[in-house]
Every structure is written in structure tokens, then in C-alpha cells.
Image: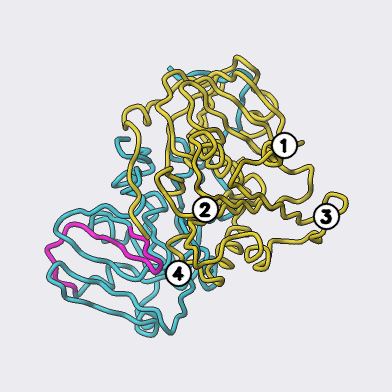
């Protein structure tokens, strides 16, 4: 039985909207990062997929822009408790980027400019569930939100959607990323409230 | 970016625990320190936060994260809550929760924005508004253990009424230098004109990058973006700048 806090009423969320457990709706777009915002120019930007055998597939900004874009509208859920509904993005599906990659890997370690990393099963990047996103709400993605481009994996807590993404390393065995090594859950499903290790 | 280690006993950290309010202190016109009784608290590292869960009579519940303000204590945890206008949770915690009433707490959480006493390098703390809370925990732990690691705190507030922990910081401690940065209104006779934190403030009152301090920056997003960017421009390596941001949302 939960403890009732006397006199607390709270603000019931819009019943037409379904929030994952422990989350509340926010209307702005909070920024969370572990360090300074890296500044990466589009001219210098590359995105590299490395397979378990060391084969590299690389895109620069021009090659990324030449790929077919999608316009997902998705809900975001941050482990710090806020959720944001109906965010509009533009980016390239990972299905497109990984289409010609030969791999037996089951895990992915995502790398960012600035040194951030996060891990997730490879299947969570496939089947229309993940994008390399470079526009938000019709504008170029701002640096504090991960621009020039970030990973977008909205079905997991937002720390998995690595900002300033620089590459994805495909691996046969799982390896924890930055927050996953600091006590956060290895998978991070908001609907199962997998915030911390052991949840 | 280095790996952060997990600390604390996992099972204890994940369990929701009833916590009764034992004391409330006014820190500023809009901020209160809440002292909770948490028997058997396993301790925390300064800079960590806890999750707080509030449940209403009808079963509705919501959660928020709050930084811990205090140094570890066997059965007490102090949180400082800034009342967010129109917030769902902070006005209740700041004004309505009465001594003897309970909330649920779990934690501590977070293994990155922490100061570990075994760190030997100088420390620069840069706070904006209520972002001082986790940094205050670092200052208090340093004091508690008698550490001689030199600390410098630059603390930006709108005006003197917004200062949190003013008397305690004015009292100071050996090896802790505190510099106040007022953005709107200064005390009488203050030589620095009111204005936002500048690179010059960080040069004058922070540490030279050559000293390789670890820098902890905490405050609202715009403040953290600006301060962390200035530190990088002044030559501090990004790996030695740790940030934590308090969004205006949530409350």
C-alpha cells in the first residue's frame, strides 16, 4: 500500500493521454546533459556504423541528406519524470542506414561527439522504431537538443536517444554505456518503469 | 567522458520508503528546506538526488526528483525545494506538507554529478539559483570530513533575497571561497555591477584551467549552457566539466 501524503491532491493528467507510470506531462523541452554541449559543424560531421568484424560504413552530412527522410511524430519520456507528447521530427530511419550492413550482432553501443555512449539491443533500432534525426519542429536541431543530429528511439527513456550521435558500434555482446554504468537500467522501457538497475 | 561507478546497496536504493517530515526551514521567500526522517538511510554521495513520490487519497500519485542538500546522516535527509509557480508538487512540499506528514522516497540516484572525497584536485562549483542545492551537499561533506581540498563557489542569484544558505556560506570554511554574482540587484556598496555571469567572473574567482579542477555546474538550462560553454572557452577540458540542469518545468 502506498503512503498517502495528507492534503495532496495533485493534478490528474488528461484522461485522453496515456502517461507511463511515474511520469508527468510537460509542455516545454527540458535539456539534460552530463557535460558541456559539444559544437559540431555539419561540414565536420560524420556518422559511422562499425560491425563486429570491424567493417565501417560512413556517411557525411551530404550523404545523409541524400537519403529518404521520414517525419515521425512521437512521444518522449525522460527518466527524470517528464513526458512530452506529439513531438515532430525529421530524420533518416535506421532501417535505411543499416540496410546493407552485414552483421550477426545483437547489441548496439551508440557513440556521441563528446564521449557519451548508450547501449541497446540492435532490434530496438530496427523496424521503424529509430531514426537519425536532424530537424525538430520544422527547424534545424539545436545543439543543446543534440544537433547537428541525434539518435531518436522514442519507445525507450530519452537517455537512449543519444544527442550529437557520431556512430553505432554493432556487437555480439552487450556493453553498458554511460548512464547504464552509473546505476541506470540497461534497457529503459518507460512503460515498465525501468529507471534504475534492478527496476 | 569517464565511466561512473555504481554506489550503494541496490535493494535499499530501489525500495520506496516512508519518510516523515520532521522540520521545515525557510531558506528564501520561495525556497524551503525539508528535513525527512529516513531510518536506516544507507547514505549518499554529495550531488546525488532522490525520487519523491506523493500519493493522494484517491490513489493518484506522481513523482519528482530532488537533489539532496545535506551531508549523509544515519536517519535524516534534507531536500531544498524551490516553489515553482503553478507547479503540481513543489507548492505542496514547500507550503502544505506538515511536520509529521509523510511522503515516499527512494534513492540515492545518480553516479556522475557527485564529488568523491578521494578526489584530490581543486573543485570549482558554479551555481545558478536553486542549482546550488547539490553543490551545498558537496560543501557540507567536505566540511564534515575535514577535507583540505580547495573549493571555490561562484553562486549566481537574482538579488540578495534569493540567496539560499546565505548565513552558512557567509560563515564559510577554511579553503572554501564563495563569490556571489547578482544578476538583477546587489547589496549596498557591492562593487560588481548587477549582471549575468561572465567569463571574467570565472577567470577572477574560479581556477585557472592549468590547475585542472573538476568543475560542477548546476542551474537552469540557459545558465548551465552559458557557464559550461565559458569554461570550455577558458581552456577547461570538457571531461572535467560536469553539469546538471534544473528545467523550469515540472515543479
Q: Quadrant of residue B133?
A: top right
Q: Which residue in the structure is indicated by mark 2?
A: B123
The image position of residue B188, as x and y in percent, is: 88, 50
Q: Secondary structure at mark 3?
A: loop
Tag shown at residue B240: none
Q: Which residue sits at x=60%, y=60%?
A: B206
Q: Is residue B91 above or below residue B173?
A: above
Q: Residues within 10 Å of mark 4 (few under 14, many from 20)?
A: many
Q: Residues within 10 Å of mark 1 (few under 14, many from 20)?
A: few
Tag shown at residue B167: 1
In the image, which residues are magenta?
A101-117
Q: Residues within 10 Å of mark 2 (few under 14, many from 20)?
A: many
Chain containing mark 4: A
Using the numbered discs, state the Cα–Cα distance from disc 3 to disc 4 in whole angstroms: 50 Å
Please report whichever mark, 1 or 3, sits nearer to the chain's N-terminal start.
1
| Chain that the image shows in cyan | A
Using the numbered discs, state the Cα–Cα distance from disc 4 to disc 1 in whole angstroms: 51 Å
Question: Dividing the image into 4 quarters, which one contains the C terminus of chain A?
Answer: top left
In the image, residue A103 lies in the stretch drawn in magenta: yes
Using the numbered discs, state the Cα–Cα distance from disc 4 to disc 2 in whole angstroms: 41 Å
- Badge 2 and badge 1 in a common chain: yes
Q: Which mark is in front, 3 or 4?
A: 3
Tag shown at residue A90: 4
Q: Quadrant of residue A197?
A: top left
Q: Secondary structure at mark 1?
A: helix
Q: Is residue B29 left or right of residue B201?
A: right
Q: Residue furthest right?
A: B188
Tag shown at residue B190: 3
In the image, residue B175 lies in the stretch drawn in magenta: no
Q: Is residue A174 left or right of residue B64?
A: left
Q: Which residue sits at x=71%, y=52%?
A: B180
Amino acid at each position: 500500500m502506498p503512503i498517502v501524503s495528507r492534503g495532496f491532491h495533485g493534478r490528474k493528467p488528461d484522461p485522453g493521454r496515456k502517461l507511463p507510470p511515474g511520469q508527468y506531462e510537460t509542455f516545454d523541452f527540458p535539456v539534460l546533459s552530463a557535460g558541456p554541449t559539444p559544437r559540431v559543424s555539419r561540414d565536420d560531421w560524420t556518422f559511422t556504423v562499425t560491425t563486429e568484424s570491424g567493417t565501417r560504413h560512413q556517411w557525411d552530412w551530404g550523404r545523409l541528406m541524400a537519403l529518404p527522410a521520414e517525419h515521425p511524430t512521437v512521444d518522449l519520456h525522460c527518466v527524470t519524470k517528464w513526458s512530452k507528447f506529439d513531438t515532430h521530427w525529421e530524420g533518416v530511419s535506421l532501417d535505411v542506414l543499416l540496410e546493407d550492413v552485414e552483421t550477426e550482432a545483437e547489441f548496439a553501443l551508440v557513440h556521441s561527439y563528446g564521449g557519451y555512449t548508450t547501449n541497446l539491443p540492435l532490434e530496438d533500432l530496427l523496424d521503424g522504431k529509430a531514426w537519425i534525426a536532424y530537424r525538430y519542429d520544422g527547424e534545424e536541431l539545436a545543439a543543446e537538443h543534440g544537433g547537428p543530429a541525434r539518435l531518436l528511439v522514442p519507445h525507450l527513456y530519452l537517455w537512449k536517444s543519444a544527442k550529437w550521435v557520431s556512430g553505432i558500434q554493432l556487437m555480439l555482446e552487450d556493453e553498458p554505456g554511460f548512464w547504464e554504468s552509473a546505476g541506470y537500467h540497461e534497457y529503459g522501457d518507460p512503460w515498465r518503469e525501468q529507471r534504475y538497475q534492478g527496476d | 567522458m569517464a565511466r561512473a561507478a555504481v554506489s550503494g546497496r541496490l535493494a535499499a536504493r530501489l525500495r520506496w520508503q516512508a519518510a516523515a517530515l520532521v522540520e521545515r526551514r525557510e531558506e528564501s521567500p520561495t525556497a524551503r528546506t525539508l528535513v525527512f526522517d529516513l531510518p536506516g538511510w544507507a547514505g549518499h554521495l554529495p550531488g546525488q538526488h532522490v525520487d519523491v513520490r506523493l500519493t493522494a487519497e484517491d490513489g493518484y500519485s506522481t513523482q519528482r526528483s530532488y537533489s539532496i542538500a545535506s551531508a549523509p546522516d544515519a536517519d535524516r535527509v534534507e531536500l531544498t525545494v524551490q516553489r515553482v509557480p503553478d507547479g503540481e508538487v513543489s507548492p505542496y512540499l514547500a507550503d502544505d506538507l506538515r511536520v509529521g506528514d509523510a511522503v515516499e522516497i527512494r534513492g540515492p540516484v545518480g553516479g556522475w554529478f557527485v564529488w568523491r572525497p578521494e578526489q584530490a584536485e581543486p573543485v570549482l562549483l558554479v551555481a545558478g539559483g536553486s542549482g546550488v542545492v547539490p553543490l551545498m551537499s558537496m560543501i557540507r561533506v567536505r566540511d564534515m570530513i575535514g577535507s583540505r581540498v580547495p573549493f571555490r563557489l561562484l553562486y549566481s542569484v537574482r538579488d540578495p533575497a534569493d540567496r539560499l544558505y546565505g548565513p552558512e556560506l557567509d560563515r564559510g570554511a577554511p579553503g572554501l571561497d564563495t563569490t556571489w554574482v547578482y544578476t538583477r540587484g546587489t547589496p549596498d556598496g557591492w562593487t560588481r555591477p548587477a549582471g549575468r555571469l561572465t567569463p571574467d567572473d570565472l577567470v577572477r574567482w574560479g581556477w585557472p584551467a592549468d590547475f585542472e579542477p573538476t568543475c560542477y555546474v548546476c542551474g537552469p538550462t540557459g545558465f548551465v549552457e552559458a557557464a559550461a560553454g565559458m569554461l570550455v572557452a577558458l581552456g577547461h577540458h570538457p571531461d572535467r566539466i560536469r553539469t546538471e540542469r534544473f528545467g523550469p518545468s515540472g515543479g
